[in-house]
Amino acid sequence: MAIQRLLVANRGEIAARIFRTCRELGIGTVAAAAPDDRGAFHTRSADETIEVASYLHPEEHIRVAKRAGADAIHPGYGFLAENADFAEAVGAAGLTWVGPPPEALRLGGDKLAAKRIAHEAGVPVVPTGEATELGFPLLVKAAAGGGGRGMRVVRGPSELDDA
């Protein structure tokens, strides 16, 4: 079934680009907007804007999508786009999730497993090694971090365990 009306659970340039593409495809659009974003570019780019208290609450986007008559949700990129539970909740609510399936999001959430899978598939990956081989300072990424969260600068061996 083709998407008729799409809610974008994001803001700014990414939302505006999605709205433009939807307009070209004849798909109706709904912008979710926090109170501070009233009149923002992405809200003017959508057919309709509905206020949300926070962009970070998945259940609120689902409620707003249903209220607006949307049949699909696009998470944009970043925090919600990496949330497998949100993707599942969208489907459970009878809406179409426009993004990777929850299983893929879960695999991607574990950065070490995702890197191993990519490497096994022949995708070039950034080489890693022991901290002592690479030298300090290091930028250490948590295996389960997303959206830039979990990144730490490590200036020496004594900081490595806490990172």
Image (spheres, grey):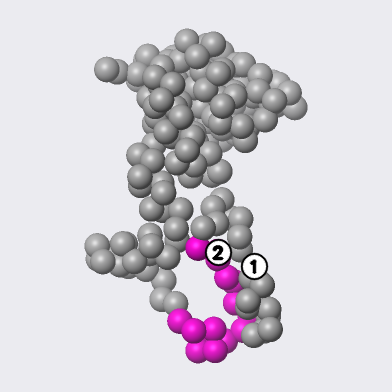
Report helix, strand or loop for mark 1: strand
In what element is the residue under mark 2?
A: loop
In the foreground, 64 or 161 = 161
- In the picture as drawn, the residue positioned furthest to the left comes out as 121
Relative to residue 99, is residue 157 drawn left or right?
Answer: right
Amino acid, disc 1: Arg
The answer, for residue 128, to whether it is visible in the render is yes
* Residue at mark 1: 152
Label number found at residue 86: none
Badges 2 and 1: C-beta atoms under 8 Å apart? yes
- Residue at 51%, 58% (x, y): give it: 144
Tell me which amino acid carries mark 2: Ala
- Crowding near pointer 1: few (<14 within 10 Å), some, many (20+)? some
Question: Residue at the right extreme?
Answer: 36
23 displayed left or right of 44: left
Quadrant for the C terminus in the image: bottom right
Give the CA separation, mark 2 to mark 1. 8 Å
Relative depth, front residue between 106 and 23: 106
Residue 160, how many percent across, how many down?
Answer: 63, 78
Q: Residue at x 62, y 35 (%)?
A: 56
Residue at x 56%, y 31% (from the top left corner): 58
Residue 156 lies within the magenta run:
no
Q: Where in the figure is residue 39, as x and y percent of width and height? A: 69, 21
Quarter of the picture holding the N terminus: top left
Residue range (magenta): 129-143
Is 32 drawn above or below residue 86 in the view shown? Answer: above
Q: Nearer the viewer, residue 50 or 67?
A: 67
Observer able to see residue 81: no
Total numbered labels placed on residues in the image: 2
